[in-house]
Image (cartoon, rainbow, N blue to C red):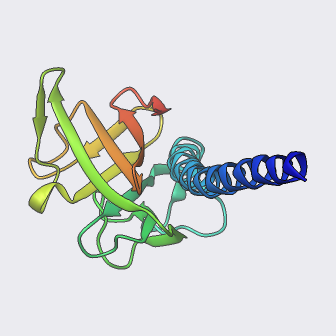
Amino acid sequence: MVELLITISILAIMTTVALANFRTFGKKSELSNTAESVVLALRQAQVYGVTTKGGGAPCGGSSFDCAYGVHVDASTNPQKIIIFADADDDSKYTNGELVETIPLSGVTISVSCMISSFLVADCGPGYRRLDVTFKRPSPDAIIYGFLGPNYQSGSITLTAGVNTVTVTVTETGQISLK
């Protein structure tokens, strides 16, 4: 009887540990999938900007000269990112330039920009807005923040609970996930 009680106790403890880890794994998985969605949106905008997106000319008659980008505004649209066609060629998102909306769920978004390798600067009002555009013929990124398109890199940080993932875009067009 004692052996049976010990076996049941061990099984109960193992089940409790497994269920606790499963919930943590689910949250980490959701965060990882959301971060991959952000990276894919940036890559999609880069491909659209460098190769020209077909299916109409959102930029005044010729999609050949059209820049495409990703807009993140953590203050007004914290649960989505926007892929846009930069019709007015100002390197930032304005109304009417929407191409696609990518919903993000279960995460908190924050953004930051780098002026140089040592100086983090305000991307927008309260570090909450970031626009990254790509334009032919170069795959380089134009990172637009509070001071205009003058930044070396921009980062989008996604947080779910205690887990954090950062997507960084450099002015050379490199997109990384950390």
In the figure, is residue 152 to the left or right of 9?
A: left
**Image side of residue 127 versus residue 4, left or right:** left
Depth check: 28 or 34 in front? 28
Look at 50% across and 60% down and name the residue there: 62
- Comparing 34 with 80, the one in front is 34
Which of 34 and 17 lies nearest the eye of the viewer?
A: 17
Q: Is residue 106 above or below residue 30?
A: below
Q: Is residue 146 above or below residue 55?
A: above
- Name which residue lies at 50% across and 48% down: 42
Residue 56 shows in the view: yes
Instruction: Tell me if residue 90 can be seen.
Output: no
Quadrant position of residue 173: top left
Most foreground residue, 150 or 30: 30
Residue 170 image offset from top left, x and y in percent: 35, 30
Q: Residue at x 58, y 44 (%)?
A: 47
Residue at the image point whose x is 10% and y is 62% from the top: 125
Q: Quadrant of residue 79?
A: bottom left
Residue 144 pos. (x, y %):
23, 48
Horizontally, is 140 left or right of 24 in the view? Answer: left
